[in-house]
Image (cartoon, grey):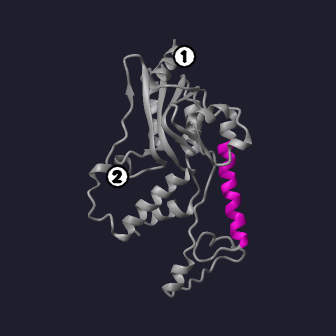
Amino acid sequence: MRFAHILHAVYREPWNISASGWLSVHEVLQNRLSGEAQNLDLSAFVNPRPDLEIDAQGIGHVHVTGVLGKNLSQIERACGNTGYEQIEAEIADAVESGARGILLHVNSPGGAASGNVETSRFVADCGVPTVAWVDELAASAAYAIAAGTSRIVAAPSAQVGSIGTILPLVDTSGQWEQRGWKPAYITHTGGDLKDATWPPNFSEAHRAHLQEMVDDYFGQFREHVLAHRSVQQSAMRGQTFLSERAKAANLIDRIGSYAGAYEELLGMVG
């Protein structure tokens, strides 16, 4: 039961994340489950996310880094990942402390779909000017958060976008058969969708139900983006763009530097 909640989140819940981002999560988890990570020195991976800072100009610096999710563990946060509630709490603290604007430092492949739209809306409605600075990557859930800011500035080599939702189901039926496991699920009468995502069952009705859920999450994502930016459907197929193409698709406002993003925010706060 130790990893039950993690397994459920990784393999049975929708994600707003890039493909490479999810594969990184999958590989780390599988190494841990197989015992390969038991004796590894993880000190090189401990790179805590910086806390809120309000500088002398009254700008609050909030970092959106690593894989995003709700209620992350201490070790997940120590590895540089960000909880949605952390973003909201730091922005609220900054505004309450008198910050004149918020600069989001974004470098993330995205994360869990659950909680993403709420935090994205919170950022958009925080009440002070906001600028998202993308040094390397603002993908999927991270892009949703950036989309509601006043301006998005990205480095020339940054990747932006990955607007989409994915439910990464893994077919484990072969493994179950090899072990001689033949599960039988008894649900309430009429509860034929109760065992959706429970291996090895996967009927067309299950697929249709899960597709509906993924589409609903994506609908929230798309609606939020379109509420703040004019983006064509062709740019919402789950792909990422380098900054020049991202700007052409109206995913960002400007290609520039961190200093330029900071100066732009200072100009907005007066």
Residue at the farthest bottom position: 180
What residue sits 51% from the left and 53% below the top? 20
Q: Nearer the viewer, residue 160 or 220?
A: 160
Seen in the picture, residue 48 relative to 7 is either above or below; the reply is: above
Residue 2 in view of the camera: no
Residue that numbered label 1 is attached to: 268
Q: Label 1: few (<14), some or many (≥20) within 10 Å?
A: some
Residue 210, disc: none
- Give the total of numbered labels: 2
Residue 134 showing in the rendered view? yes
Side of 205 where 200 appears, left or right: left
* Residue at figure coordinates x 49%, y 16% from the top left: 266
- Amino acid at dot 1: Met
Residues shaded magenta: 204-222
Residue 208 falls in image quadrant: bottom right
Q: Is residue 3 magenta?
A: no
Along the line of sight, the residue nearer the viewer: 225 or 43:
43
- Residue 185: image x %, image y %? 60, 80
